[in-house]
Image (cartoon, coloured by chain):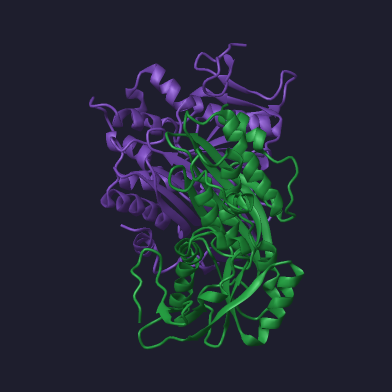
Chain colours: A green, B purple
């Protein structure tokens, strides 16, 4: 399939976003956004690093590529609107597989009311998918990770560790309870977009999407906000069937497991009730998992109150765990 | 070098664009543009397909990657503002090479007053650089390729065929006059950004950037505008030293040579003088090369009046050339 035939095939016949002036088909796309701030993020998925065609079908590869980018937009409290995608296609990738990837992208775009407005397909030796996502947020309401303040309640959406468990299952023939749920948690992550962009009524909320595990994201908030976060391990929400895994798996996956794409955030006690109302309205499971303190002299850090009620420092993935 | 060390290294300490609210460092970047339309394009360059480390140094690979995207923004009559870049880095690429690529990107960004606001670096087996560029244009003034009208003057900026000649020289040890000029035309293309975004005073102008040869771009305008374009071959501007090449090379490179990144466009006779004034003000060589007619019954097409004064149909690169 040549590049132009392909572009014509994936070009949307109807666009969803009223701000779009010109979609695919000229040198660039044009949109207009006089009333809101514009949020944009780019992310690339490479075969063998971020996904494997051995355990993921093309549809899921496409779906997940866009979902990962929508998650970054949601983590700013913004509503996704557009995406551009560049795919490097190796000879080993058939037209059918390529169509599957686009079907997956389109399906995720449909879920999030997004329009494809640009990109290209080029040949190469390695399959990679580079997505740029663009979203909109009310002025001054972008939710930075630097906004946490002492006294805030720390919360998380959904349950954690499921995507890592799903990835494990996709690589295993063993019998597991709830296999489809976990596999889909990895292959078709549900992004908390509706919840995130309905937070505009709140004065201040901190958000970070959990793409590299809660330990990592919590440390990013602590660093950016110059605060200490305390997380109570027993409060970290997991699915009931998560108990089927070994204690070590549970611990690793819920703290360091990547790509759950749930939201970790903080909000003042005053606005906690309103946050809960928004969560109910958008059918978003919301759990209080800890609180924010001022940074201790040792620096901005994350403390985990473990299952023995002992405080340990929670470091980013790959770092040594030291007891205090 | 890990991803975070690298991001901190390339992160700009000062941003140039006043519309930027938040640059690199959160889940996504944020900007605000209430008064202008927003233009965006994505383009990926893959080693072995779009460039070779054997003949291009890392600086030029980076420079050209951004320049190619700025060209798409200029072809909409817009001023570039931001870019996001995702680089897939193979093991064969040293930290020094990677820095060279970023130096090239930064240099092109500096020329065009752009800010790096996002992206990532991921490991893979093949070097590829995916850039998304974002620019701004006065409302309703994006210059679509569909705007050409019968009676328009057809024009081109700069000279054509130089980038193809430069690419040829980079692969040759032969003696050539003006070698540095031609090689730089390929390695560090000059984008007509200043000229393009000063056209806002014109009511109507069509623009297309010459990335795949004038034959290709002219056909795109003819198709999109439902018109016939006539180009006089003798008027197509080339550099004086272009005469050193064989007749066949000259013909091929000026008509089908890619990546000159000059602008092909059309404007009404009424606005031609104003266009010339803008070209003079921005020191942009501007040449009238033909005119626009209504589409003949055979369809939208491009006619080349060749050096023997005979009209031939000019087809896209790769298509058979048929005499009429």
Q: In the displayed structure, would residue B82 be above or below residue B216?
A: below
Q: Position of residue A177 (x, y in %)?
A: 61, 53
- A2 or B153, which lies in front? A2
Q: Position of residue A316 (x, y in %)?
A: 40, 68
Q: Position of residue A242 (x, y in %)?
A: 57, 61
Q: How many marks?
A: 0
Left or right of A260, for residue B53 = left
The C terminus of chain B sits in image quarter: top right
- A313 or A205, which lies in front? A313
Q: In the displayed structure, would residue A177 be above or below residue A74?
A: above
The answer to whether any part of residue B75 appears in the image is no
- A179 or B25, which lies in front? A179
Question: Which residue is painted at 56% across and 63% down in the image?
Answer: A243
Q: In the displayed structure, would residue B60 be above or below residue B23?
A: above
Outermost residue on the top side: it is B323
The N terminus of chain B sits in image quarter: bottom left
The answer to whether any part of residue B305 appears in the image is yes
Question: Which residue is painted at 43% across and 76% down in the image?
Answer: A223
- Image quarter for residue B32? bottom right
Q: Position of residue B118 (x, y in %)?
A: 48, 59
């Amino acid at each position: 399939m040549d590049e132009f035939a392909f572009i014509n095939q994936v070009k949307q016949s109807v666009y969803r976003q009223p701000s779009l002036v010109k979609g695919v088909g000229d040198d660039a796309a044009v949109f207009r956004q006089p009333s809101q701030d514009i949020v944009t993020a780019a992310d690339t998925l490479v075969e063998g690093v971020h996904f494997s065609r051995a355990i993921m079908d093309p549809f899921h590869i496409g779906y997940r590529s866009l979902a990962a980018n929508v998650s970054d937009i949601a983590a700013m409290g913004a509503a996704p609107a557009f995406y551009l995608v560049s795919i490097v296609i190796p000879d080993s990738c058939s037209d059918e597989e390529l169509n599957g990837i686009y079907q997956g992208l389109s399906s995720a775009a449909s879920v999030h009311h997004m329009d494809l407005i640009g990109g290209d397909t080029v040949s190469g030796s390695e399959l990679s998918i580079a997505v740029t996502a663009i979203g909109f947020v009310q002025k001054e309401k972008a939710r930075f990770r630097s906004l946490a303040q002492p006294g805030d309640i720390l919360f998380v959406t959904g349950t954690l560790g499921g995507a890592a468990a799903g990835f494990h299952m996709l690589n295993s023939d063993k019998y597991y309870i709830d296999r489809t749920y976990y596999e889909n948690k990895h292959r078709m992550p549900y992004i908390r977009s509706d919840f995130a962009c309905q937070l505009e009524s709140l004065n201040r909320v901190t958000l970070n999407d959990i793409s590299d595990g809660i330990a990592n994201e919590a440390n990013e908030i602590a660093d950016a906000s110059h605060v200490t976060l305390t997380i109570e391990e027993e409060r970290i929400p997991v699915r009931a069937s998560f108990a089927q895994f070994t204690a070590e798996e549970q611990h690793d996956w819920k703290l360091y497991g990547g790509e759950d794409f749930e939201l970790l955030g903080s909000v003042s006690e005053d606005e906690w009730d309103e946050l809960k109302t928004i969560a109910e309205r958008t059918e978003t499971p919301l759990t209080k998992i800890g609180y924010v303190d001022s940074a201790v002299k040792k620096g901005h850090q994350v403390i985990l109150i473990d299952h023995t009620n002992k405080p340990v420092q929670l470091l980013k993935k790959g770092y040594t765990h030291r007891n205090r």
